[in-house]
Image (cartoon, helix red, strand yellow):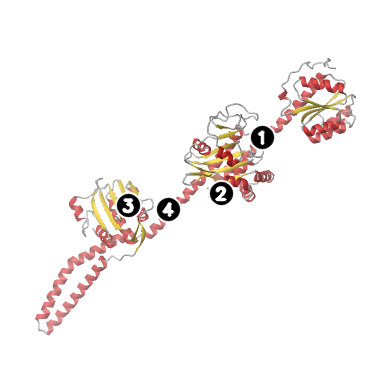
Amino acid sequence: MAGSTLAGVPQHISLAPEQLLQGGEVVVIVDDDAAIREPLRRYFSNQGLAVEESATGAGLLDLLKHRKVALVLLDIGLPDIDGVTLLPQVVEKDHDIAVVMLTGVADLQVAMECIRQGATDYISKPANFDQIFHVSRKALEKRRLVLENRKYQEELEEAHFRLRLLHQLSLKMNNVYLSTVELDEILQAVLVGITAQEGLGFNRAFLAMFTEDEKELRGHMAIGPGCREEAGRIWGEMREKGMDFGQIVQDIRQRCNDDDSQVNRIVRHLTVSAEEKDNLLIRAVNSRRSVLVSRDYGGISLLLNRDWGNGEEDGDGGHLPAGESVPIPHDLIGTLGEGSFVVVPLYSPGRAFGVIIADNYVTGRSITGVHVSALELFASQASLAIEQSHLYQEMQQRLAELEALYDELNRSKDLLVEAERYSAIGQMAAQLVHTIRNPITSIGGVSRILQKKTDDESWGKYIKVITRETARLESTLNELFDFVSQVKLEKHPLQLCDLVNKTLLLLQQEIKRQQIKWHIQCPPDGMTARADERQMRQVFLQLLKNSVEAMPDGGVLTITINEEEGQAVIRICDTGTGLLSSQVERARDPFFTTKTYGTGMGLTLVEKAVEAHGGTFTLKTAKTGGMEATVRIPL
């Protein structure tokens, strides 16, 4: 038999064994005739195939328990069990086993029955070894094509799942701004997508994010084996029921929050200072490159991603990246309890957010460049979600500032009018005092003299009227003057920096229209003094308003607030038109003004209010060419 050939079948066939058998698989020859079984085993072995043999059906069933069998050459006439009866048991144990039936009786009905029971092919004895090997090779090739087709189908389904999930993540983020709660739902969905078998299939996934001050990287959330199993059920339901993304994240939140206590303990210990530039996590996020830590290639090694598409091809069809040496992160390996993991950075063009760490702690499966590339897709969605959440938070902050400004404007909308009205009252009172008071005093004095010198009762009666009414006028003038000049203070702890900022808000329209640049310098903790808020608001408003009006064509407004010798010192300096030295001396006099409008009482009232607080007010020409006003009040 060994020397014979069939027409059209080559005597010597040279095939690479790894193309037929993979991963420790073997071919099993089952025949009770040792004269056929042993030479056939040697022939197959010479062709480079791993071969086992058995003389009985029981021996085959035992081999199936301990070895990975790719092909069975099964004789129908076995001493302990009929081959046709044994065939369904073999197929039931592993549907991927190829079975070629051998028989000494050419019976078409038996052959058809074997094919129906799951046999791959049928050979009638006698047949030479070349023919048997040829049929076996075809059976193995057919089996390999089936397995590869199934593998490709699974990969397509997984890719479709990932694309669908990424698409739904994008829709979720495009439809709404993300609050903190919604962001956590998105991030948890991303982690479950990374760990789900239908997703990337990692065993564990950890998320670490920078704190608000960006000084520390802290663990935020994690998904581990317990929730991974639950995630598989979630994705199965999603496929079967057509669940939308809202239902998915809701299920994730309900089913995964209380699980995986071990991974939650681990993620709480993931704390790294941003100053540790050589730390693996900080280095990955700063360089914006994924990092693969692996012990699969000559001990524990660390590879920084340059191009996951280039490099040596690995056993799973991926590529090993070109790497560079960096310190081995023993502390991180100790925290995770795993020496092989991948770190993928989360970032936007303007800032870094954190990292995702994924490993195969349970299965020990190797992490390839293909896995890292797929993980980077999920990381990009997580980065987009975090960026959108930050934009939402910033928008909320801006809205809060606008609401505060609106409230401040509502409270102070009449303040400018009131200040002008107050100045007008002061001007009127001063005019009454200086214009009317002297004549009234003279009339009163003369009437009193006349009253003493006349004895005529009829004239005395008229003189008394003049004296009495003159006294009433003098009293009225004095009361009016006292009302205007008296400053009633209600002192409370007052944050001066906040008050200046709020007052600036009232002048923002003029500042923007006149293209004025302004700067304010305050101590880190602010400056607090006991003062009357209403009076100090009028002081700052008048001084800031004067500076803004002095710069109609733009300029720079500088405000500094600090402490000097137990006093709060507020300096307001502008680059405006300024005043002449003679005008500076008279600027605080009542009714003096260089404007075409106004009463000239503004700086007078400022000085009066500051003095009422026990402070001082000075005005001088600034080095910048404008004016510098300085207010000092005791702390």
Q: Are marks 4 and 2 in contact (CB under 8 Å)?
A: no
The x, y position of residue 234, in whole percent, is 66, 46
Residue type, mark 2 in image: Glu
Q: Which mark, residue 402?
A: 4
Q: How far apart are marks 1 and 3 (CA)?
A: 67 Å
Q: Distance between the residues labelled 4 and 3?
A: 28 Å
Measured along the vertical axis of the image, is residue 549 above or below residue 338?
Answer: below
Q: Do the residues labelled 1 and 3 touch (CB within 8 Å)?
A: no
Residue drawn where x is 49% and y is 44% of the image: 216
Q: Is residue 286 left or right of residue 364?
A: left
Residues 24 and 191: in front is 24
One can see residue 141 in this view = yes
Q: Please name the residue that numbered disc 2 is placed on.
A: 182
Instruction: Tell me the quarter of the picture where residue 170 sits.
Output: top right
Q: Distance between the residues labelled 4 and 2?
A: 24 Å
Q: Label 4 neighbourhood size at 10 Å, few (<14), some (14-19), many (20+)?
A: few
Secondary-structure class at tag 2? helix
For marks 1 and 3 on the same chain, the one whose residue lies earlier in the sequence = 1
Q: Please name the residue that numbered disc 3 is placed on.
A: 562
For marks 4 and 1 on the same chain, the one whose residue lies earlier in the sequence = 1
For marks 4 and 2 on the same chain, the one whose residue lies earlier in the sequence = 2
Q: How far apart are marks 3 and 2 (CA)?
A: 43 Å
Residue type, mark 1 in image: Glu
The x, y position of residue 356, in whole percent, is 56, 40
Secondary-structure class at tag 3? strand
For marks 1 and 2 on the same chain, the one whose residue lies earlier in the sequence = 1
Q: Distance between the residues labelled 1 and 2?
A: 30 Å
**Which image quarter holds the N terminus?**
top right
Residues 259 and 607: in front is 259
Secondary-structure class at tag 1? helix
The x, y position of residue 16, in whole percent, is 71, 21
